[in-house]
Image: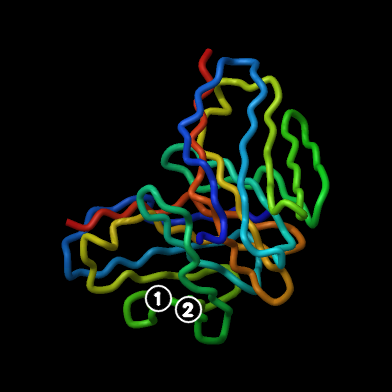
Amino acid sequence: QKEVEQDPGPLSVPEGAIVSLNCTYSNSAFQYFMWYRQYSRKGPELLMYTYSSGNKEDGRFTAQVDKSSKYISLFIRDSQPSDSATYLCAVLYGGATNKLIFGTGTLLAVQP
Amino acid sequence: SAVISQKPSRDICQRGTSLTIQCQVDSQVTMMFWYRQQPGQSLTLIATANQGSEATYESGFVIDKFPISRPNLTFSTLTVSNMSPEDSSIYLCSVGSPNYGYTFGSGTRLTVV
């Protein structure tokens, strides 16, 4: 079993739609949860970063962590064509380790 | 957050040769990380590089294949040695911490022919 599972998509939505991206993870010891956006031929860009359970909002983006279900989500409101990219979830144990464990990424296309 | 410059951005190399990738950070950092992103797969940590000490490699990665240098607090190199087509990947450097998150460079896209 992979430590982090993510639906690869592709996911295609019309402009203005609400997008829901999801990951599940296997180890309840993970404490830090991140979402990255990666445009084609670019490095991953940190979008959202949360510690433990709960919601975090930043503009059109909301990250949600449910540790009881080992489930993390990223919501994008009023999606734009510029949001078209691959979205990667990542988890981290914390403490002395800095090893990020990534999902395989979900390819999102927002159609104008 | 830190700004990372990575070069080369891409290269096509002959099998059996080596390529050195450079990573420059605009601020001093204790640890730098090297990741590999193979086609269709998730990013995987290769090693952690601390200034003044030998790099720490993850399971499945060895120093002879991926030697790393860390001469100061703003610079690191990763060499991919004796390359084969299976080494064709994107290689990325990263800096950060659990409290602030992690920033990545733009990556080096390597094709081995």
Q: Are marks 1 and 2 in contact (CB under 8 Å)?
A: yes
Seen at 51% across and 78% down, the residue is B71
The tally of labels here is 2
- Vertical placement of residue B9 versus A12, above or below: below
Seen at 31% across and 55% down, the residue is B110
Mark 1 lies on residue? B61
Instruction: Tell me the colour scheme of the image.
Output: rainbow
Chain bearing tag 2 is: B
x and y percentages locating residue B85 in the rendered image: 21, 60
x and y percentages locating residue B25 in the rendered image: 58, 61
Q: Which mark is residue B50?
A: none
Direction top: furthest residue: A112
Q: Is residue A72 left or right of residue A81?
A: right
Chain bearing tag 1 is: B
Seen at 58% across and 80% down, the residue is B51
Residue type at mark 2 is Tyr
CA neighbours of label 1 inside 10 A, class few (<14), some (14 to 19), many (20+): some
Between B80 and A87, the one lying in front of the other is A87
Between B102 and A72, the one lying in front of the other is A72
x and y percentages locating residue B17 in the rendered image: 20, 69
Mark 2 lies on residue? B57
x and y percentages locating residue B47 in the rendered image: 49, 73
Q: Secondary structure at mark 1?
A: loop
Q: Quadrant of residue A94?
A: bottom right
- Vertical placement of residue A16 versus A8, above or below: above
Residue type at mark 1 is Phe
Alpha carbon distance from label 1 to label 2: 6 Å
Seen at 66% across and 63% down, the residue is A92
Q: Are marks 1 and 2 on the same chain?
A: yes
